[in-house]
Amino acid sequence: MMQSPPLMNIQPILLHASSPPMLNKLKALAESVPSGAFVEVGVHNGNTAVGLYEVAIAQGRELYLYDTFSGMPYSGWDDHHQIGEMSDCSVQTVITRMPKAHVIEGVFPASAVPMPPIAFVHADADQYESTAGICRHFPPLMVPGGQILFDDYRCLRGCIRAVDEYFPGRVVLDDGRALVTFG
Ligand SMILES: C[S@@+](CC[C@H](N)C(=O)[O-])C[C@H]1O[C@@H](n2cnc3c(N)ncnc32)[C@H](O)[C@@H]1O
């Protein structure tokens, strides 16, 4: 029988990832990484992606946005969401909001397209299997000094388990998000 990890590092969701303080910090982190593309996995209607888009346009970077646009593709034993939750979004909305971004519909990482070297990933896919896919896919693609920010480390057990398994050296920010920097 699998045991749940301790709940001590799970914080109540006080602020949404797209709330001004969280979004400003996301933008500040993205702004400061070396040259390279930006990626978000877990886009929904693009409320955090618009922050990355603003920085990407200002700095001349490519932005890749991945989502099923039909809700959660997986649900494991310690995941909060059921399969199909968060399907109240549309790929067309995201394309309209961010016309210069590469918007890719499908289950990541099977949906991954060829990308240039990557400097910043915003991982916001909630579930264990999706986060584990992010942890496996991006390391060989990251530029030195590139970063992955895991939003759900502050509140979702499946995400915490995946990040702790793949990146035990992750840094936990004061808002509970986890940050991994590549050498
Ligand atoms: C919390 S929402 C993203 C919220 C968005 N970043 C924002 O702040 O507005 C999580 C999204 O992850 C997507 N998702 C989860 N696992 C995925 C996977 N393996 N591939 C593609 N999309 C996935 C879901 O469809 C959902 O839209």
Image: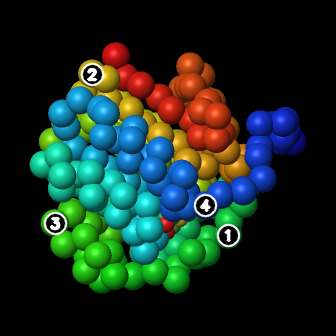
Q: Are marks 1 and 4 in contact (CB under 8 Å)?
A: no
Q: Which residue is mark 1?
A: 82
User: Can you say which quadrant of the picture contains the C terminus?
Assistant: top left
Q: Position of residue 21 (x, y in %)?
A: 54, 52
Q: Position of residue 108 (x, y in %)?
A: 39, 56
| Crowd tier of the residue under label 1, counting other residues whose Cα lies within 10 Å: few below 14, some 14–19, many 20 or above | some
Q: Which label lies toward us, 4 or 2?
A: 4
| Crowd tier of the residue under label 3, counting other residues whose Cα lies within 10 Å: few below 14, some 14–19, many 20 or above | some
Residue 2 seen from this side: no
Left or right of 86 in this view: 2: right
Q: Which residue is mark 3?
A: 100
Q: Which residue is mark 2?
A: 144
Quadrant assignment, res 100? bottom left
Work out how far the residue at label 4 is from the one at label 2, CA to CA, in angstroms: 29 Å
Left or right of 27 in this view: 112: left
Q: Earlier in the sequence, mark 3 or mark 4?
A: 4
The residue tagged with tag 4: helix, strand or loop? loop
Between 133 and 9, the one lying in front of the other is 9
| Crowd tier of the residue under label 2, counting other residues whose Cα lies within 10 Å: few below 14, some 14–19, many 20 or above | some
Tell whether circle 2 marks a residue whose Cβ is less than 8 angstroms from ligand 1. Answer: no
Q: Position of residue 76 (x, y in %)?
A: 68, 55
Q: Amino acid at mark 2?
A: Pro
Q: Earlier in the sequence, mark 3 or mark 1?
A: 1
Work out how far the residue at label 3 is from the one at label 4, CA to CA, in angstroms: 25 Å
Q: Residue at x 22, y 44 (%)?
A: 37
